[in-house]
Image (cartoon, rainbow, N blue to C red):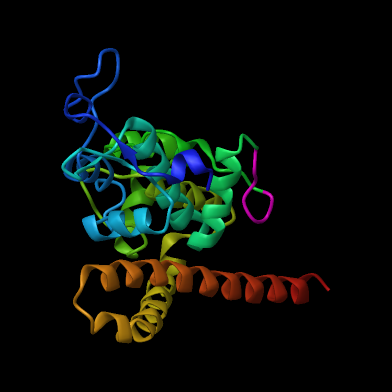
Amino acid sequence: MAANSAQVRAVSVSEAQGQAPGSAPLLSIGQVLARLTPEFTELTPSKLRFLEEQGLVAPARTESGYRKFCASDVDRLRLILSMQRYHYLPLKVIRSYLDDLDAGLSPVLPGGTTPGASMLGTSRRLTRDELLREAGASATLLHDAVSASIILPAEHYGDSVLHVLRALVELQRSGIEPRHLRGFRGAAERELGLIESALVPLARRKDASSRAKAAEMAVEIAGQLEVIRGSLIRSALGRLTN
């Protein structure tokens, strides 16, 4: 990471209280969590500190040692969490990507993709009607998706659910309905069982650092399982077209 972003910044008391003229207020860990956990429920104080320990984000520090985050820190955290969620990228890949950004480059993610607007923009909380409108889906399709346990019912929905519902709209055009996908929930639960088994050594430790490492390891294992699943599907498709 670029030196200027990796170094811990010291701020005065007035800056830490958000009183610097013409600048946005700096945020505490609790305020950062309040902004991000509605979309990224897996984010905890221990994981936030773990990301800092790994050099992915460098919040300012008050003279008393308290962490203070600016708006760009929050955007950076949102990008990191989004790359983990939507691309299952390990931290070393994310760190390399951020290093390139800090160097003024225009990097692409593995596979030649760039983060989409939903990853870089402000997190959203969509109502049911907003979700249906943006996905171009019918209320019946959403109901069927909930009945098939593909989408969990909620008062508000994030971008991840929007992506799923849009995919269901496209699948429906090919004659594939949510009821045909009931087995996906069972497959996901089996994969979760594999991940939980792999995390047993860390789960036995009760310290915050081990919990944060376990959360990171879970994301990386999920990414590797996604690679294998995708490869198997592509191989099967090859047999269909030959």
Q: Horizontal and vertical percent for residue 54?
A: 41, 58
* Residue at the (42%, 67%) spot, across then down: 219
Residue 8 at what x, y percent from top left? 36, 44
Residue nearer the viewer, 208 or 119: 208
Quarter of the figure that contains the C terminus: bottom right
Asked where in the image residue 145 lies, by quadrant, the reply is bottom left
Q: Quadrant of residue 230?
A: bottom right
> Residue drawn at (59%, 76%), measured in percent from left and top?
228
Magenta region, mostly helix, strand or loop? loop
Residue 2 position within the rendered picture, expressed as x and y whole percent measured from the top left: 53, 43
Q: Where 2 falls versus 217 (above or below)? A: above
Q: Is residue 89 visible?
A: no
The front one of 100 and 181 is 100
Q: Position of residue 188 (x, y in %)?
A: 40, 73
Q: Which residues are magenta?
A: 106-112
The answer to whether residue 76 is visible is: yes
